[in-house]
Image (tube, rainbow, N blue to C red):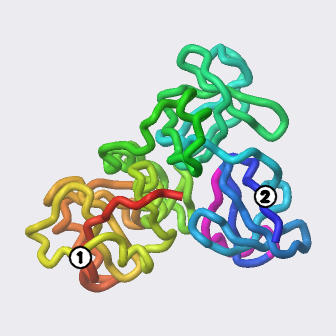
Amino acid sequence: MALFRIITPSAPLRSGPFANAALDSECLFGEAFETERSETGFTFGRLASDGYQGWVPDNCLGALPAPNARVIVPMSDVTSQADIKSAGRFALSLGALVTITELQDDRAEMITPNSSGFLPRQHLLRLAPRAADDKAASHVLGDVTRVDDWVAIAEKLVASPYKWGGRCAWGLDCSALVQLALAAGGIDAPRDSGPQHHIGSRIDDSSQLQRGDLVFWHGHVGIMQDGKTLLHANAHHMAVASEPLGDAIARIAITAGPVTALRRPMPERVR
């Protein structure tokens, strides 16, 4: 099994080795992809961050060094030079993983497949080090490895388009919103809402809900902004939207039934 990384801003993870196969999920720049076999321009493998399996276009895979930072804003523009007026190269989504080599004032230089690029330092969060001697990333990016309020990361995505199987700021589904925002808070989460049912600890009564708690239905999940307001990517609004929890419960009950779980995430080491 060979290990590659995603070298495009995002990459579709499809159910079969062809362009119109169902979109099961998406991979983000810098994520590791463990490959098994290739055919018709696609490679089958496993996304190392969450174990999701599927087919990725061959041109999305390549070589990059191990990342040391995560993008924690909805989108960040990568320029060719440190000067913000220099030509733009591509945009990265929340959750993209990058390797930062140095800082030039408030601009961070990252390694790209063919050269380098620059993005704002304030758009980045250092990854938790893999080894005790990982001093380079600490020197460049500081010691902070998680945000204090991960819900605020999710709130920045309000009005982002809803996309079945999507996992980027330019289109994502309910469980991707949860997974990406939790990652910024240092909480490792599965990709789908079903396995996400087991995150953290159970809450027995909705009166106990607070900011950062998760509300589940069959096939759906949302994030509490406070004790009464739900944030979720959903097909009713076709966007990430904030609404009273009671309104969401009444509407979702018609198609997906009642709430199935209330959970309070617990910090774990993020991948």
Which residue corresponds to the image point at 70% horizontal and 57% vertical from the top-left?
11
Which residue corresponds to the image point at 43% horizontal and 80% vertical from the top-left?
194
Mark 2 or mark 1: which comes first in sequence? 2
Percent of width and height locating residue 222 = 32, 65
On screen, residue 92 above or below 247? above
Please identify the quadrant where the C terminus is shown: bottom right
* Span shown in magenta: 17-28
Percent of width and height locating residue 190 = 48, 70
Q: Is residue 87 left or right of residue 138?
A: right
Q: Is residue 216 left or right of residue 77?
A: left
Tell me if residue 23 is in the magenta stretch: yes
On screen, residue 115 above or below 92? above
Tell me where residue 22 sits by quadrant: bottom right
Residue at the outermost front position: 133
In this view, the residue in front, 100 or 242, is: 100
Q: Which residue is mark 2?
A: 4
Residue at the outermost left position: 207
In this view, the residue in front, 264 or 68, is: 68
Q: Which residue is mark 1?
A: 202
Q: Is residue 74 visible?
A: yes
Q: How many marks?
A: 2
Please identify the quadrant where the N terminus is shown: bottom right
The dot on residue 72 is none
Tell me where residue 99 sits by quadrant: top right
Q: Of the residues shown, which amino acid type is indicated by label 2?
A: Phe
Residue at the outermost bottom position: 257
Distance CA(mark 2)–CA(mark 1): 37 Å
Percent of width and height locating residue 60 = 79, 55
Which residue corresponds to the image point at 74% horizontal and 45% vertical from the top-left?
65
Tell me if residue 140 is in the magenta stretch: no
Numbered disc 2: secondary structure:
strand
